[in-house]
Image: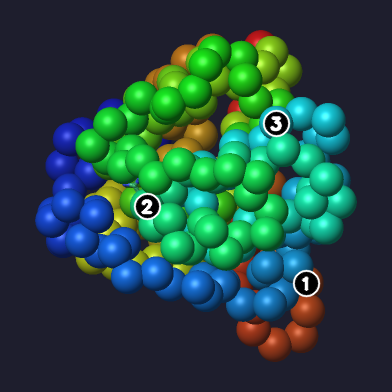
């Protein structure tokens, strides 16, 4: 992956994100097969007994029901969406494109997830560095994505490259440039079935 140029993070709609996310969308942004693939993956990977951060959160975290017993904090743009999310024990409204500094103490979370939202970050390196700061040692930042997007709000580089391996490479470069992540892994967890399903890809990195 080439150097990340500032123009890669331009968007068609450069208005404040508060305007776009003002109206709640209580919807699943991917199809049922993709939702199930994510839930199954999170069931395998999310630790128990640790606080989890659902970054860029909304009405659904795609977590298995066992996570209802865990402490899960949401950070997103719309309080009505997060208020309906049964997985969240608390949540905060915070615009990461205005302020990538996470409003949390160091070494606070056993895992952080970003689900089908990475394409909206205009300052991903700063956010990944912040995620590293607030993760406990050995905790993972888990980025899950598919091929759907709000095109006017997605950054230009995301729209220009095809879904799949090249998006994984872009996210891998975010981890590498942010530094100090280990065991960076790219996985394809798309459901293997007859007929169409939204693809699902993952990139994870661990705090060393
Ligand atoms: C497609 S939705 C995905 C929501 C959820 N993670 C899911 O899996 O259904 C994109 C989410 O990104 C969040 N988001 C977009 N721009 C953001 C920003 N600048 N700062 C924080 N969150 C943002 C919004 O709150 C929105 O809920």
Return the residue at label 3.
51
Q: Quadrant of residue 135?
A: top right
Q: In the rendered view of the protein, which quadrant contains the C terminus?
A: top right
* Figure quadrant of the N terminus: top left
Residue 63 at what x, y percent from top left? 73, 55
Q: Estimate the spatial distance between the alpha carbons at disc 2 and disc 3, rounded to whole Å.
A: 20 Å
Would you say the residues marked 1 and 2 are in contact, meaning their CB atoms lie under 8 Å apart?
A: no
Q: Which residue is mark 1?
A: 192
- Front residue of 121/53: it is 53
Can residue 167 be seen in this snapshot? no
Please name whichever residue, 176 or 1, is drawn nearer the observer in this view of the structure: 176
Q: Give the structural element (helix, strand or loop) at label 3.
A: loop
Q: Answer with the quadrant where ligand 1 appears in the image.
A: bottom left
**Nearer to us in this view, 107 or 24:** 24
- Residue 52 showing in the rendered view: yes
Question: Disc 2 marks which residue?
Answer: 77
Sequence-first tag of 1 and 2:
2
Asked whether disc 3 touches disc 1, contact meaning CB atoms under 8 Å apart, the reply is no
User: Total of numbered circles in the picture?
Assistant: 3
């Amino acid at each position: 992956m080439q150097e990340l140029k500032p123009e890669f993070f331009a968007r068609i709609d450069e208005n404040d994100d508060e305007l776009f996310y003002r109206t709640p969308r209580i919807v699943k942004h991917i199809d049922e097969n993709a939702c199930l693939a994510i839930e199954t993956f999170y069931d395998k990977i999310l630790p128990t007994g640790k606080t989890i951060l659902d970054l860029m959160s909304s009405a659904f975290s795609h977590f298995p029901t066992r996570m209802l017993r865990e402490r899960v904090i949401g950070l997103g743009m719309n309080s009505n969406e997060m208020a309906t999310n049964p997985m969240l024990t608390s949540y905060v409204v915070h615009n990461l494109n205005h302020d990538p500094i996470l409003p949390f103490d160091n070494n606070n979370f056993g895992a952080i997830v970003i689900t089908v939202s990475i394409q909206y970050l205009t300052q991903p390196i700063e956010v990944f560095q912040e995620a590293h700061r607030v993760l406990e040692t050995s905790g993972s930042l888990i980025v899950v994505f598919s091929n759907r997007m709000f095109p006017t709000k997605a950054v230009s580089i995301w729209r220009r490259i095809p879904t799949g391996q090249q998006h994984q490479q872009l996210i891998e470069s975010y981890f590498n440039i942010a530094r100090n992540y280990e065991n960076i892994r790219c996985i394809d967890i798309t459901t293997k079935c007859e007929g169409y399903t939204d693809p699902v890809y993952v990139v994870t990195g661990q705090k060393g």
